[in-house]
Image (tube, grey):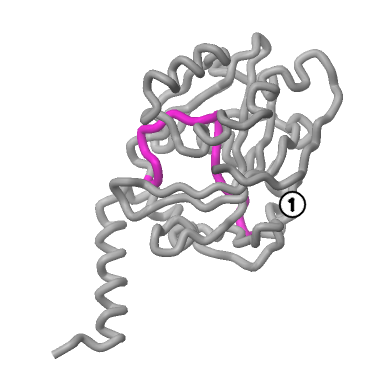
Amino acid sequence: MKPSLRGLSQIGMARRAVELSSYDAQQVEYMREQCINVDENDRIIGGVSKREAHSSYQLVLHRAFSVFSFTSDNKLLMQKRSAEKITFPNLWTNTCCSHPLHTQQEMDGVPGAKRAAIRKLEHELGITGVSLNKFQMAGKYIYRAEMNNAPWGEHELDYALILRGIGAENCNINENEVAEVREVVLDELKLWMRKEPNSFTPWLKLFSQTETFEKWWTINKNTEESIEDTNIYKLH
């Protein structure tokens, strides 16, 4: 006898529950957060749970942000994602990567993404005292990536945010989020990525292949001029 559609649905729900049951309880709780579902023109469609947005069965396009914080001596502050992370654990990436939430404060385009970045810089890295005007908006980037060994992935419209003057000495890491931090110069990162390509998140590897990536290392280093790029680019 074939299982009913209802039965198949229950089997699928149970399978996904098992998938989450093996993960860290705090990280599972974060999967209930509501991300911002958008179209490829960054128009808001509605809310979508972090779990739904990152399930490889769906991979719903949603807003994200990626902070690239450079020290006064032009080193990128990087973090290694903790082993507890559900998506892309134990991989090195840029300073802070997460999502604006489907809330009034964080749905407001660039200002909302910057507010979310301030929230997560403190939550993940213990970095405080960052104001909205400290960020430089360096474009919006659409990309898609799936994990090879788990039913999760990313499909994001990612706001790139440049920050300067903050390094490892400003960090007090949340070990449930971040395993360690490191500062690197551009040439060091290039060599590291060539030697250990599987040690990095897919979005950082995609960012590193763009024409503008190297320019970010010197943006606003000796000037107060704003770049404020809000164009949308596709990463492949």
Give the left or right position of residue 136, taking residue 93 as reference.
right
Q: Position of residue 226 (x, y in %)?
A: 83, 29
Please name the residue shown 39% across and 32% down the image. 91
**Numbered range of the magenta stretch:** 86-102
Q: Position of residue 207 (x, y in %)?
A: 57, 33
Residue on which disc 1 sits: 109
Image quadrant where one finds the C terminus = top right
Q: Nearer the viewer, residue 129 or 16?
A: 16
Please name the residue shown 81% across and 31% down the image. 227
How dense is the environment of label 1, judged by Cα within 10 Å: few (below 14), some, or many (20 and up)?
some
Give the left or right position of residue 81, taking residue 164 as reference.
left
Q: Is residue 186 magenta?
A: no
Image quadrant where one finds the N terminus = bottom left
Give the left or right position of residue 123, taking residue 161 as reference.
left
* Identity, as a three-letter code, of the amino acid under mark 1: Gly
Query: What is the magenta segment's predominant secondary structure?
Result: loop
Q: Residue furthest right?
A: 225
Does residue 148 lie above or below 184 as drawn? below
Please name the residue shown 61% across and 43% down the image. 65
